[in-house]
Amino acid sequence: MPKLPPLLAKPVEFLPLWLVERAARGIFSGVLKAHPGLFERLGDYRQTCYCFSPSDLSLHFRVVPAAQTLSVSRGEPPPADARIEGPLALLLGLLEGRCDADALFFSRDLSVIGDMEAMLALRNALDDSAIDLPRELGALAGPFSPLVTGAARHIRTHMLAERQATWN
Amino acid sequence: MELICPAGTPAAFREALDAGADAVYCGFRDETNARNFPGLNFSRDELRQSIALAHGRNVQTFIALNTFMRAGDEALWYRAADDAVEMGADALILADFGLMAYVAERYPEQRLHVSVQASASNPDAIRFLVEAFGVKRVVLPRVLTVQDIARLTRQIDCEVEVFAFGGLCVMAEGRCSLSSYATGKSPNMSGVCSPASHVRYREEGGTLVSELGAYTINRFGPGEASGYPTLCKGRFDVGGTEGYAFEDPVSLDVIDEIDALRAAGVSALKIEGRQRGKAYVAEVVSSLKRALDAGPAERAKLVSRLRVMSEGQRTTSGAYDKRWR
Amino acid sequence: METKRAALSLGPIYYLWDGPKWRDFYFRIADEAAVEHVTIGETVCFKRQHFSEPHVAEVIERLEAAGKRVTFSTLAMVTLERESRHVRELIRDSAHSVEANDLSALGLLKGVAHSIGPLVNVYNAATARTLAARGAENICLPPELPAASIQRMLNAMPDFSFELFAFGRMPLAISARCAHARSKGLTKDSCQFICGEDPDGLPLRTLDRQSFLVLNGVQTMSSSCAVLLDDLLPLVEAGLARIRLSPQDCDIVRVASLYRAVLDGRIGGDEALVELATVYPGVRFSNGFLHQREGATWVARGRNVTTAGA
């Protein structure tokens, strides 16, 4: 299973929540701004409270698309309509619309709790949106943009390679 | 043979074009088609733009209106047909006789294809559809052998399209109410089968239990690949023996039979999977496109690559590999 | 207000019953059952044909002598040449009305008065009208249809004869592959008519031992038995012409008399239900499809069927 490199995971563990939250909000609003179609495609599910729980970070990201709100917490998962838990690499794959709707459900590395249909709607909406997280991340980094984008791409490729080694 | 490719979103539509589709099939974002999944399908504007894009590349667009009209609400289907004709669909894919009659009468020039959901499985059935509604092509149920198909095409004056790759219905399509028996939602009426709204996964001490509505569809032991609880691919108890009573969770793949299908008089090969996203569309369409033109040696290589993809449907995560590019 | 009367109709036997059982069943129907229409003939699997064939003539004679209207059912799924031939010959040679259960029969029956079985997809009046224009005179609607759809079709075609599947395990799916043979380690081609061992279907349970479906050769049926009783009355008022009972391995004569009594207002649905449970014991009843719910569900207080606006 692809794990976030400890070198990266550890510091995130000790980051103050407000900092993580600020970064995540930046990405979130950037994504919503850049991909208005995503919002429309979600239909009624834009009211859904989604929670993403990367198992290798012990953080929970709670998002309501309609309200454009995002909050981050540690510990027990917060209440949500639909929650997905799994390694960050897979969650990012989901966000970028890189994984198949079917595959989402087949993998036992990912588990969906709550409204399965809401999660499917999100997956389908994301599939049409062509989100590139490293680029979004880079956009936040101002003058360091190319550096951040490059580093993020490197990490993604690294995790991808590890995944292929595991399954093929 | 033409290659008919699925698209659930404009992004997947573009991937299909880039990958070499001869035609792309898709549907509106409502219950007028049999992939009425949340977040999937096309608004009127999206479809209009996609058709224009396809026509610019000399690619056809087929619009699936292949559910059965709900009594009293026929206007929803009629309007979808009106719009599809107006926006220049190269063919409408229909299953409901009432809708076929409407389109045949109102738009005699519009090309009609018979959806697999109509379950036209023999020469007399196809002759009926040609005679009654002037259909030009029939998508055959996924239950006929290549020999059956060859025998069929010789007896009819109508093009034949067959599924070549993707999800496989075990039951005759359009004639299955298993999903609505368990969930109240059916392919024929709601455009969904074993809908996600009724799916639950439950952990039971390392065992993952998948449920659809009130029914257990499968149990997966620790480490065993899990699957989506599609009713006809579930594990059941028949006479004290547990197993896949209808079909193992496998998908269809007839690439080895391409030459035989061509010889059998098949006009077009269809790829299933409007719900499966752009990565799947790109990979499967490009591989099949090359396989159609390839010699036996190269085709074998392409086939084995695709097999990984289809096997991913039943192994936990194999499919993921191909999503990450 | 004048109360409308619906006729009772007996659908084809979906199961494989041996010749004598098949014959005796219909003899008793002829002699005792309160049904006006009887549809006979193998519908599920062409291979079973020869079991009933020797007895068809005497059964028809007895049924007609008793005043029953006899109709022949065609095969639900036709893929092989010999199956096509069989349907063609049936339609060409039959002196009786034919009930179409697949598209090939629809084509062959053009211009001839005929019936449409519940295995043809008729979900709306537009489709019913299209078929009526080709000669269909009676349409038994698919079990999946909700009451609202039925009401709307009745309103749209007030003079047409619609029939509703109101008793029996529901035919839910059909396949080219025989799950029944497969479950006993056989295939469709080498099946040894193993489905004959289960005259009321072979139960299929979930891994948690919930009753779910029954296998009947290439057909998959509901484990629960559709029972529409009080539910029928508003539909009959709206013009529903026939009520179909589908043969199960139980006392269908008694079932028919209970249905007749409910339709005639001699007993209430609740009373009939209690009786039915003794006639067909150990089987759950369902009416969910009619109420736009899961087909397997039982909705009590069936009088409150939602009716569509006129």
Image: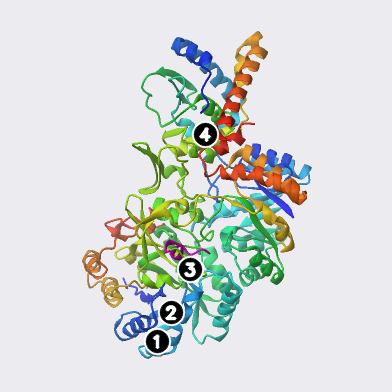
Residue topped by disc 1: C59
Q: Give x and y (percent) for residue B105.
A: 66, 63
Most foreground residue, B239 or B153:
B239
Res C40 label = 2
Q: Secondary structure at mark 2?
A: strand
Residue B96 in sight in this render: no
User: In the image, is residue C279 part of the stretch drawn in magenta?
Assistant: no
Q: Which mark is residue C157?
A: 3
Q: Are marks 2 and 1 on the same chain?
A: yes
Instruction: Give the residue type that dot 3 points to.
Output: Met
Q: Nearer the viewer, residue A17 or B192?
A: A17
**What amino acid is labelled 2 in the image?**
Ile
Disc 2 + disc 1, Cβ < 8 Å? yes
Snapshot quadrant of residue B104? bottom right
Chain hosting mark 4? A
Calculate the distance from the C-alpha at mark 1 to the C-alpha at mark 3: 34 Å
Same chain, labels 3 and 2? yes
Q: Chain of mark 1?
A: C
How many angstroms separate mark 2 from mark 4 (CA)? 51 Å
In three-dimensional space, the C-alpha distance between marks 2 and 1, rounded to whole angstroms, equals 9 Å
Instruction: Give the SS element for disc 4.
Output: helix
Q: Which residues are magenta?
A: C176-184
| Residues under numbered marks 1 and 4 in contact, where contact means CB atoms less than 8 Å apart | no
Q: Earlier in the sequence, mark 3 or mark 2?
A: 2
| Nearer the camera: disc 3 or disc 2 | 2
